[in-house]
Image (cartoon, rainbow, N blue to C red):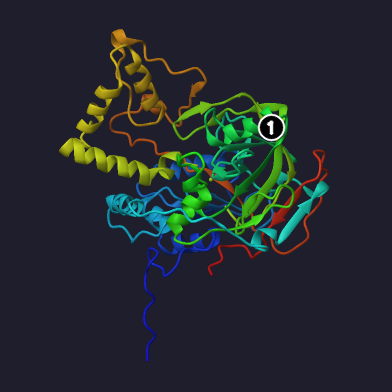
């Protein structure tokens, strides 16, 4: 007797993917993964990722055989930059149209309930551990993405994990992390972000702020980390609610912070009051450079790394939420959506934007977000870009020189190191920043389905 076919409850599968490796296997099976061998970490990965993202229905990009690095170290770009990959990430039915994902997201949020993570003692992230002088962040092919970037960024599709010292809840935000040298990284968190508020609480007490930086985890966690959740709601809980079951976490060795048990790389350390270093600029998904100032530098006391996995594109990361908003605008604006301007948007602007000249500020912000070119400011102002944003032309004329017949530049999927060393001893490197711990997840090169 033939066995009954498994019930498809998670996209085309009977269960959620366990980790990023299994996710890669699934998107490759769906024709959503492009493998590129031999691309160099300096600019070539960034250029190729951006070029691929310009294509309609662009696949995710997996860079393999990176020059100057051992066989098996890989880098992934654009993991969630399509509706089909979003559906696989979130467990929605296989979509025939982008709005299918929007509707599925909207319907799920009507019944969504947070599910806290489950603490476990062991996991793949602990299969390889480096301590003290063994630490070298540049052991991994961390990319230098844009020509005017301030450095190499290991944290783009990352999770920066912190615990509120007063309310004891765990925040997992996607903040950019720049490599300063082999054993020092810098974290930039914009004012007002939950991570910044938590860090400031430690600093006001005169204490260093413990922090984890996870790279190469379930893309669901990245989607949660790039979302705007209410203060006090952990992204672990929010993502678990979407997954329908808890994420597994392991308490870190130094500070007891919960790190994803199936992550590829986790750095553990702390940010110290008064210790700053130059950070940026970085070519953001909006098409502009931002940063280039003194930022707080991380003093990693511990780094748990799991070299198997492959960074944010906030535009695509927020696609379900943005899709929900677009559906609302469609309901309000009738058939105008998609013809250059929706009535729903116009009405919102008329309600919230006074005639005092602030309209220019809103238009500039929309321009930065890549939604459309701002109107001429006229008597309301000159429409100048805020200080701190530098034009980043990505091809002839850049975004501001975009021709009507030219396809609009899509957001660059963020890139992160996806090393997959075999089960061999790691080489030691001199460490001058105190004790570090680095955990590597072992495994053969290539995505491993379970």
From this view, report whether residue 403 is shown above or below residue 167.
above
- Residue name at image x 43 percent, y 18 percent: 385
148 left or right of 402 in image: right
Give the x, y percent position of residue 367.
37, 26
Q: Is residue 334 above or below residue 120?
A: above
Q: Is residue 450 left or right of residue 109?
A: right
Report if residue 394 is visible in the image.
Answer: yes
Task: Using the image, determine if residue 349 lies above or below residue 187.
Answer: above
Q: Quadrant of the N terminus?
A: bottom left
Question: Which of 401/350 is in front?
Answer: 350
Give the image quarter of residue 401.
Answer: top left
Q: Position of residue 76 (x, y in %)?
A: 54, 50
The tally of labels here is 1
Which residue reaches farthest top?
379
Residue corresponding to mark 1:
297
Farthest residue to the bottom: give it: 1
Q: Secondary structure at mark 1?
A: strand
Quadrant of the snapshot with the C terminus: bottom right
Q: Residues within 10 Å of mark 1 (few under 14, many from 20)?
A: many
Residue 379 position within the rendered picture, expressed as x and y whole percent measured from the top left: 29, 7
Q: Residue furthest left?
A: 335
Compare residues 331 and 130 and report the one nearer the observer: 331
In percent of width and height, residue 293 lies at 62, 23
Residue 55 seen from this side: no
Q: Nearer the viewer, residue 57 or 171?
A: 171
């Amino acid at each position: 007797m033939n066995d009954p076919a498994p019930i498809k409850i998670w996209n085309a599968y009977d269960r959620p993917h366990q980790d990023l490796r299994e996710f890669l296997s699934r998107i490759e099976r769906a024709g959503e993964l492009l493998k590129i061998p031999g691309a160099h970490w300096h600019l070539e990965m960034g250029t190729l990722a951006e070029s691929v993202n310009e294509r309609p229905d662009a696949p995710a990009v997996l860079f393999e055989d990176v020059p100057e690095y051992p066989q098996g170290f890989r880098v992934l770009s654009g993991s969630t930059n399509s509706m089909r990959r979003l559906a696989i990430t979130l467990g929605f039915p296989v979509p025939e149209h982008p709005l299918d994902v929007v509707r599925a997201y909207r319907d799920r949020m009507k019944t969504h309930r947070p599910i806290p993570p489950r603490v476990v003692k062991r996991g793949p992230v602990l299969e390889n551990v480096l301590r003290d002088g063994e630490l070298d962040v540049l052991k991994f092919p961390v990319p230098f993405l844009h020509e005017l970037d301030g450095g190499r960024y290991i944290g783009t599709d990352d999770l920066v994990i912190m615990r509120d010292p007063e309310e004891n809840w765990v925040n997992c935000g996607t903040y950019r992390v720049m490599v300063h040298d082999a054993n020092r990284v810098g974290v930039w968190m914009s004012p007002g972000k939950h991570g910044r508020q938590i860090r400031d609480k430690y600093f006001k007490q005169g204490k260093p702020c413990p922090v984890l930086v996870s790279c190469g985890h379930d893309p669901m966690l990245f989607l949660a980390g790039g979302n705007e959740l209410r203060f006090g709601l952990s992204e672990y809980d929010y993502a678990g609610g979407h997954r329908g079951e808890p994420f597994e976490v392991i308490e870190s060795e130094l500070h007891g912070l919960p790190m994803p048990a199936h992550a590829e790389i986790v750095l553990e350390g702390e940010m110290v009051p008064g210790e700053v270093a130059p950070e940026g600029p970085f070519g953001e998904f909006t098409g502009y450079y931002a940063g280039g100032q003194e930022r707080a530098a991380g003093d990693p006391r511990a780094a748990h790394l799991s070299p198997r996995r492959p960074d944010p594109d906030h535009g695509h990361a927020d696609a379900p939420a943005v899709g929900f908003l677009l559906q609302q605008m469609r309901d309000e604006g009738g058939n105008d959506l998609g013809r250059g301007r929706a009535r729903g948007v116009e009405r919102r602007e008329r309600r919230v934007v006074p005639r005092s000249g602030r309209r220019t500020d809103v238009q500039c912000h929309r321009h930065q977000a890549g939604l459309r070119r701002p109107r001429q400011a006229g008597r309301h102002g000159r429409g100048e870009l805020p200080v701190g944003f530098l034009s980043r032309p990505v091809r002839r004329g850049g975004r501001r020189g975009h021709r009507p017949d030219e396809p609009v530049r899509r957001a660059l999927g963020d890139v992160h190191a996806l090393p997959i060393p075999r089960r061999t001893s790691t080489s030691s490197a001199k460490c001058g920043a105190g004790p570090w711990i680095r955990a590597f997840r072992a495994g053969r090169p290539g995505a491993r389905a379970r």
